Image (tube, rainbow, N blue to C red):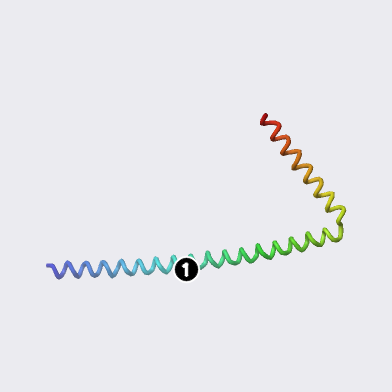
């Protein structure tokens, strides 16, 4: 009786071990996939940032007055919005 109970326990432990190993493999594959996708997204983001920086430098060198006018307009718009929000709070 005790031997059959021990055999049953051993079989259950062995079966559980198989399920745990399978879950571990699936989790490892998923983590590896997510890590690879994260690395690819990071590389793509870096390339986009470098391209954007290069394009901005190129535009500033070729059209400095238009770039300064754009900065002035954006600064005025932000200043107007901040003043409007702060005036509304009082």
11 versus 87 height, above or below: below
Image position of 69 (left or right of 7): right
Compare residues 82 and 19 and report the one nearer the observer.
82
Front in this rendered view, residue 53 or 44:
53
Q: Which residue is located at x 30 percent, y 66 percent?
A: 16
Q: Which residue is mark 1?
A: 29
Give the quadrant of residue 12: bottom left
> Percent from the top left, x then y, of residue 40?
60, 66
* Horizontal side, residue 55 vs residue 35: left or right: right
Quadrant containing the N terminus in the rendered view: bottom left
Numbered-mark total? 1
Label 1 crowd (10 A; few <14 / some 14-19 / many >=20): few
x, y (%) of residue 76?
79, 42
Q: Quadrant of the C terminus?
A: top right
| Nearest to the observer: residue 44 or residue 87 | 87
The residue shown at (73%, 34%) is: 84
The foreground one among 31 and 63 is 63
Compared across the picture, whether 62 is left or right of 24 comes to: right
| Left or right side of 24 for 46 | right
Secondary element type, mark 1: helix
The x, y position of residue 50, in whole percent, is 71, 64
What x and y, as percent, mark residue 54?
Answer: 76, 63
- In this rendering, is residue 72 above or below 40? above
Locate residue 88: give its quadrant: top right
Which residue is situated farthest in the top direction here?
A: 90
């Amino acid at each position: 009786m005790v031997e059959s109970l021990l055999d049953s326990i051993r079989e259950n432990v062995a079966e559980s071990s198989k399920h745990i190993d399978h879950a571990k493999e699936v989790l490892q594959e998923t983590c590896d996939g997510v890590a690879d996708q994260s690395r690819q997204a990071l590389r793509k983001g870096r390339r986009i940032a470098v391209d954007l920086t290069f394009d901005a430098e190129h535009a500033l060198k070729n059209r400095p007055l238009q770039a300064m006018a754009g900065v002035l307009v954006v600064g005025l718009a932000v200043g107007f919005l901040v003043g409007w929000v702060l005036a509304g709070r009082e």
